[in-house]
Amino acid sequence: MRSLGSVLHRSGKRLLLIQCDASKLPRMYSDVVDRRLRAVGKIVDIFGNIQKPYAAVLCYRGCRMEVGEKVFGK
């Protein structure tokens, strides 16, 4: 389990935008969990520049994550 970053924005009901740490870049389609180890969704896109990458997470159900909350990868 490693920290992926924090939630920057919720877009619609099923998409989260996360600011990732450049040294710990996640893999595409990896699972994302919250701090209580509940499944949130999968990473569907990584974009942005090299120093500050962003990831788009497609949630399994409606996203209940708040802006600023940390997310983790398996």
Image (cartoon, grey):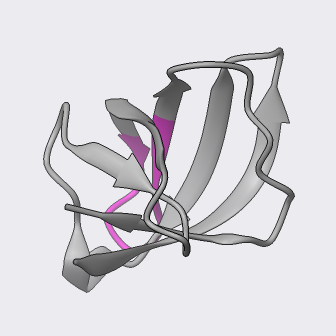
- Residue 41 falls inside the magenta stretch: no
> Which x, y percent locates residue 24?
23, 78
From the viewer's perspective, is residue 33 above or below residue 42? Answer: below
Residue 62 lies in what quarter of the image?
top right
The residue at 85%/60% (across/down) is 67
The residue at 27%/43% (across/down) is 31
Residue 17 lies in what quarter of the image?
top right
Q: Nearer the viewer, residue 63 or 48?
A: 63
> Does 67 sit left or right of 6 as displayed?
right
> Does 67 sit left or right of 30 as displayed?
right
> Does 67 sit left or right of 71 as displayed?
right
Q: Nearer the viewer, residue 59 or 55?
A: 59
Quadrant in which the C terminus is drawn = bottom left
> Does 23 sit left or right of 34 as displayed?
left
From the viewer's perspective, is residue 73 above or below residue 60? Answer: below
In magenta, the rendered stretch is 47-56
> Which x, y percent locates residue 47?
40, 40
Quadrant in which the N terminus is drawn = bottom left
> Which x, y percent locates residue 5?
50, 73
The residue at 80%/45% (across/down) is 9
Q: Nearer the viewer, residue 8 or 74?
A: 74
> Which x, y percent locates residue 45?
35, 29
